[in-house]
Amino acid sequence: MTRNKTILYAVIIAFTIIAPFAFPNYGTQLATLWLMIIVSLTWDMTGGQMGYNSLGNIFFYGTGMYVAALIAIGLTYDIGDYNSAAGGGIYEFTDAQYFGGLALGVIGAGVFCSLSAIVIGILVFGLRGPYFAIGTLGVAIAAGELVSNWNWVGGGQGIALPVYPGDLDQGKDFFYFLFAAVGVSAFLFAKWLYGTRFGAAINAIRDDEEKADAMGIHTLRYKLYTWAMAAFFVGMAGGISGFQLIHFEPLETAYQTINLGIFMVVCVLLGGKGTLWGPVVGAILFHLFKEITWNYLLGWQWVALGALIVVTVVYFQDGVLGWLMAKRPEWFGIRVEKKVAEQVE
Amino acid sequence: MSAIIDVSGVSKAFGGVVANESVSLSVDAGTITGLIGPNGSGKTTLFNSIVGYHPIDAGSIKFEGREISELSVQQIARRGLLRTFQQTRIYGAMNCVDNMLISLPHRKMNIWDALKTFTAEDYERADQLLEFVGLYEKRFLKSGDLSFGQQKLLEFAMALMNEPTCLLLDEPTAGINPTLINGLIDRLKRANSDFGITLFVIEHNMRVIMNMAERIYCLAHGKMLAEGTPDEIQHDQRVIDAYLGAH
């Protein structure tokens, strides 16, 4: 079992490293796949593991994008001047300025998003169930509208970032590996977190928050920390996306509530809510489905996607992993143990 | 003996319905104390007031000498005053061991402790307590699939895992097969004598409470009707009248 797991992880890591070179034409697609995995994994931290279905995690994606871009620009130029010229080719970045700005920007985006999760969390974690979902959605929509009316950060036009200095194909691989690094970190982080007492406490909140209260668990504190952790990774992913896209604008790219904001939820439902692997499996299946329909069912692609969402939500709520768990409970350690004398470990 | 819970003059009304009216009682540390009364006499309301589920209208509630009537449920639980529910509350989707591990006392845990994985001692203690309530063989089953009586036992084990100083039990034997009740009484008594946990128990089953409690309070219509030893309560005409419906 453990040996099989080691082999499985080795294969996945090997594939992660080889993939962009083996499928050079799909570099951007593979990078997007990692983005989907990151947002799904982190959505499941609150949605699946803690029972708080946020529709506003896209807020951290958009905010991360803006924060990273503003840090990178602000380190070298005046942000207001830069944005009113919309980049305009006037402003040059040296390699050091580009990579330094990117690194600090992406980390800063993660930190900023974590802090905003705490502040927003204090306001919205009083809401339960559908009210929490709508409340967080409102935050994301409001943020998009606010930013698109704020000229200092580019207003409705958004921000144009400098292009990757160097060979563009090499640039694709660069962004792929950045996403992959954040994705692998998010996965390892989640895997570790779910095995701790912290993980057990957020599961308790999901299953019966009132009972968790009655047992003395700091429920609000755990909810805030969990969302802040999720926001950290989403913020970083958003920051990387900004540099990868070169140009982004507030409503369709950054705070894209109806695209990525919903996709992450569908990925998790498809793969299996509240499991470690579910979001990963779901993101892969969803991304494949999306790319295939976009290529071969063009014109009907949104209909096909809508149908997938409806079928998942209505008939397949437990997802692939949930279905497996029901079919093969023994794979997941559900068993009756007959007590043998002296067997107590 | 000193009082661990000291309730004095507590009143609680829901709109026009007065659930508790100037109720006073005290629970001595290390004892088993009973609370009885006909349906609707305000027993669960009093429990809820003590553990902080709702603010009280008047009076004071002290735990270990400190006022707790203004504290939240979590804060009171972290002081070591815990309750179980009349409608059993367990984490149904998880197995028994996970239910136990979740119940580790968070009052003894800061955020860095919380970020540690469960230790071998945690597992051992979970197994011991599951053994104590007789659920060891079922420990890897989904707890939601257990029978109601077994879920009550699990909830009791979870409460013990939390290492409370004082445990409020709301009808621990309700819905439990009569043949298992003796075993449960024995375990409650052992929790009191072996683990030193003060028990304050709401119970409808007279045989159970008379067997267990050292002191019993009887509520009727939201007011304290009588108090005394099991013997005194059993022969108190007011208590008999309240239960038989005489007014």
Image (cartoon, grey):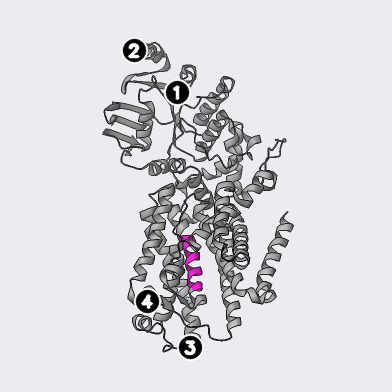
Horizontal and vertical percent position of residue A242: 48, 74
Q: Give me the residue at 39% from left, 63% from top.
A: A116
Q: CA distance from mark 2 to mark 1?
A: 18 Å
Q: Which element type, helix, strand or loop, lies under badge 3?
A: loop
Q: Residue at x 41, y 56 (%)?
A: A136
Q: Confirm whether residue A273 shows in the render.
A: no
Residue plotted at (39% across, 49% down): A127
Question: Which segment did they paint magenta?
Answer: A228-241
Q: Is residue A161 left or right of residue A286?
A: left
User: Looking at the image, do the residues carrying marks 2 and 1 touch, with CB atoms under 8 Å apart?
Assistant: no
Q: Position of residue B219 (x, y in %)?
A: 35, 21
Between tags 3 and 1, which lies in front?
A: 3
Please state which of the two labelled residues, at mark 3 or mark 4, is closer to the viewer. 4
Q: Earlier in the sequence, mark 2 or mark 1?
A: 1
The chain letter under disc 2 is B
Chain on which label 4 sits: A
The N terminus of chain A lies in quadrant: bottom right
Mark 4–mark 1 Cα distance, whole angstroms, equals 68 Å
Tell me the kind of residue under disc 2: Arg
Magenta-drawn stretch contains A239: yes
- Residue that badge 4 annotates: A154
Residue designated by label 3: A94
